[in-house]
Image (cartoon, rainbow, N blue to C red):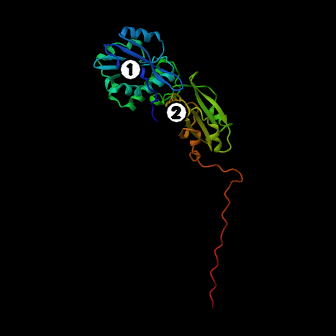
């Protein structure tokens, strides 16, 4: 699954970047949140001092900054340490598409978390490691770096004991007691990421009598982590309906593996199989193990056919 968000810049931003002519002139852009998120122009500046003053006054707001430095331009993904998690991941996953719109061959790329890094010395004597990476490697590096910075800054508690890359969970798991005890009462538990509280919470829980009911219980308007228990085995279902927001789908996909590891670390729940679907109707019930037979549903035995006797031999 791609980590790119699909968010693009509007023409006003691209025109402003194309108009940069003087050294250290810059364009500041921001992702505007709406039903169709878009990267929009915020400000333009003619020197680094004015740029730093503006960025510093915007507290923890992530920004894209493009600085002209003939013959190239510097592309900065500025994501302060205490910016919301979802914003950090959104900026990381939208960066590649934005660079391609500008023309990636003319850019040197950087990720800064401190306004003081926006300085000529940050790029004069170094070669950006990012320029040597493929787009896929860079996207993964960006998201991993954001999660690592969240862990080190203490802004969000990362609950998994596994701490490398995608194994680090970017959200707290709300305390709901023992999940194993919960599965003694229910066989289907739905989890969702609460973007406001930045927690993974239990959205709902059910006891289903047939596998077919699972499709009806999984929401068709928002991504969900679902755990289904059957015959002592646990099945993990990531559903990302086609009508849900791109940024939500990206966040769920980025945290899937870490949440599974956390289930093992915190509740000793081993997932037998992980299933990824779009809409709930795409769930293949055959992926959930053998179909359980209910009373009276046994297949009737085939009638036994007696082998005819051979004709008797005449004497």
Observer-side mark, 2 or 1, equals 1
Residue located at (42% from left, 8% from top): 53
Badge 2: few (under 14), some or many (20 or more) residues near its Cα, within 10 Å?
Answer: many
Report the number of discs: 2
Gap in angstroms between the C-alphas marked 2 and 1 = 38 Å
Q: Is residue 49 above or below residue 65?
A: above
Image x and y of residue 252, in percent: 53, 31
Q: Which mark is residue 256?
A: 2
Image x and y of residue 180, in percent: 63, 35
Assign a secondary structure to mark 2: helix
Q: Which mark is residue 15?
A: 1
Q: Which mark is residue 305?
A: none
Please state which of residues 61 and 128 is positioned toward the viewer in this rendering: 61
Residue located at (62% from left, 87% from top): 313
Image x and y of residue 153, in percent: 48, 18
Please state which of residues 130 and 301 is positioned toward the viewer in this rendering: 130
The first of marks 2 and 1 along the sequence is 1
Q: Residue furthest right?
A: 296
- Report if residue 297 is visible in the image: yes
Residue located at (64% from left, 37% from top): 217
């Amino acid at each position: 699954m791609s980590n790119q968000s699909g968010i693009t810049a509007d023409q006003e931003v691209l025109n402003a970047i194309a108009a940069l002519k003087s050294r250290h002139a810059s364009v500041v852009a921001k992702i505007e949140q709406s039903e169709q998120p878009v990267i929009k122009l915020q400000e333009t500046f003619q020197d680094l001092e004015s740029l730093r003053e503006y960025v510093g006054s915007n507290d923890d707001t992530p920004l894209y900054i493009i600085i002209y430095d003939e013959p190239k331009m510097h592309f900065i993904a500025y994501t302060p340490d205490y910016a919301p998690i979802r914003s950090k991941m959104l900026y990381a996953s939208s960066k590649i598409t934005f660079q391609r719109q500008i023309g990636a061959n003319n850019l040197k790329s950087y990720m800064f978390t401190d306004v003081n890094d926006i300085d000529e010395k940050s790029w004069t004597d170094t070669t950006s490691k990012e320029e040597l990476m493929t787009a896929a490697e860079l996207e993964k590096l960006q998201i991993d770096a954001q999660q690592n910075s969240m862990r080190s800054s203490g802004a969000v508690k990362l609950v998994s004991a596994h701490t490398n890359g995608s194994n680090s969970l970017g959200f707290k798991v709300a305390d709901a007691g023992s999940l194993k005890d919960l599965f003694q009462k229910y066989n289907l538990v739905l989890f969702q990421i609460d973007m406001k509280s930045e927690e993974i919470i239990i959205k709902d829980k059910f006891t289903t009598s047939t596998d077919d009911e699972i499709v009806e219980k999984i929401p068709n308007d928002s991504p969900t982590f679902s755990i289904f228990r059957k015959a002592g085995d646990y099945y993990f279902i990531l559903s990302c309906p086609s009508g849900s927001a791109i940024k939500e789908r990206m966040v769920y996909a980025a945290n899937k593996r870490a949440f599974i590891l956390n289930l093992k670390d915190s509740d000793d729940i081993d997932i037998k199989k992980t299933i990824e679907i779009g809409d709930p109707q795409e769930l293949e019930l055959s992926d959930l193990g053998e179909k359980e037979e209910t009373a009276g549903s046994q297949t009737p035995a085939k009638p036994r056919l007696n082998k005819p006797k051979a004709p008797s031999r005449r004497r």
